[in-house]
Amino acid sequence: MQVIVKSNYDDVSSEAYKLIVKIVEANPNAILGLATGSSPIGLYNNMIDGYKKGMSYKEIRTVNLDEYIGLGKNDSQSYITFMKENLFSHIDINLDNVNLPNGLCKNQEEECQRYTALLATMQQDIQILGIGSNGHIGFNEPGTAIDSTTNIVKLKESTRLDNQRFFSSLADVPTHAITMGIKNIMMAKSILVVATGKNKAEAVYKMIKGPVSIDCPASILQLHNNCTVIIDTDAASKL
Ligand code: F6R
């Protein structure tokens, strides 16, 4: 694990962007694994600025980590909507090349199989991750099997409370999500974790210094041979 500590969110975002530039410049057809949430928004803003300055994302392909069960493209809080609002609508990406699990699927088991099969054909050149305050990656909560593939997750109360800020009330936060499994994440050629803020300090500590344990899913990343963690001083405060 390579750990880079920057002084604030903006510096974390521009440092993370350098990795993306390197990958897209080396391979315009690169496969980017994307995340939602607050952590990567600054990175996505850098990607949008890069596009305005001439960088092209026309040929890249993307796979997102997860989606809420019950939400889809017409819902303001779905992850497909998030990705459009925070990245896809602002760059020259071909929307035929973006992939997310379908939160509105009729048959959840089939959808998990479809997404895992898709991922088997789309090894991420880089997988971007945030980290939950409980150490989750994607929506793989503590206790998830290390060899999990795409699966349906009952969200922990702590995760629903963390994400309540995006909804009008806790009752509106979905109870379940569909997420890439830990195995699907670990298959990526490289992994980039971005985290900022004091509320991530404990999880960041366990990810980097803790035992590799499914009690903190992010600690499994210690076993990946090309994982970069970019954090601010607050998130690094327990290291
Ligand atoms: C998002 C995801 C989650 C978030 C994590 C951190 O697609 O899978 O694991 O990365 O919950 O969220 P933020 O960045 O909002 O603190």
Image: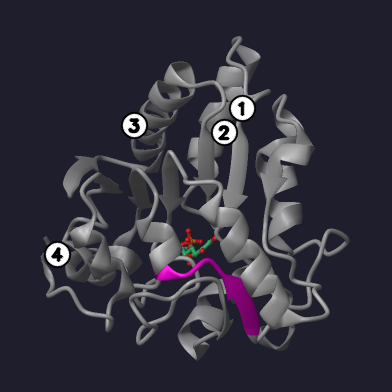
Q: Earlier in the sequence, mark 4 or mark 3?
A: 3
Assess disc 2: are there few (<14), some (14-19) or many (≥20) residues with their C-alpha within 10 Å of its C-alpha: some
| Place of residue 157 in the rendered image (x, y in percent of width and height, measured from the top left) | 51, 89
Q: Which mark is residue 161?
A: none
C-alpha span from label 2 to label 4: 28 Å
Residue picked out by circle 4: 238
How many numbered circles does the render carry? 4
C-alpha span from label 3 to label 1: 15 Å
Provide the residue span drawn in magenta: 176-182
Is residue 180 covered in magenta? yes
Assess disc 4: are there few (<14), some (14-19) or many (≥20) residues with their C-alpha within 10 Å of its C-alpha: some
| Place of residue 140 in the rendered image (x, y in percent of width and height, measured from the top left) | 45, 75
Q: Earlier in the sequence, mark 4 or mark 1?
A: 1
* 170 is higher (above) or lower (below) than 3: below
User: From where the camera sits, is residue 75 visible?
Assistant: yes
Is residue 179 covered in magenta? yes
C-alpha span from label 4 to label 3: 21 Å
Q: Residue at x 62, y 17 (%)?
A: 56
From the viewer's side, name the closer residue of 232 and 90: 90
Residue type indicated by callout 3? Glu
Q: Is mark 4 within 8 Å of ligand 1?
A: no
Left/right placement of residue 63 relative to residue 159 reads: right
Residue picked out by circle 1: 48
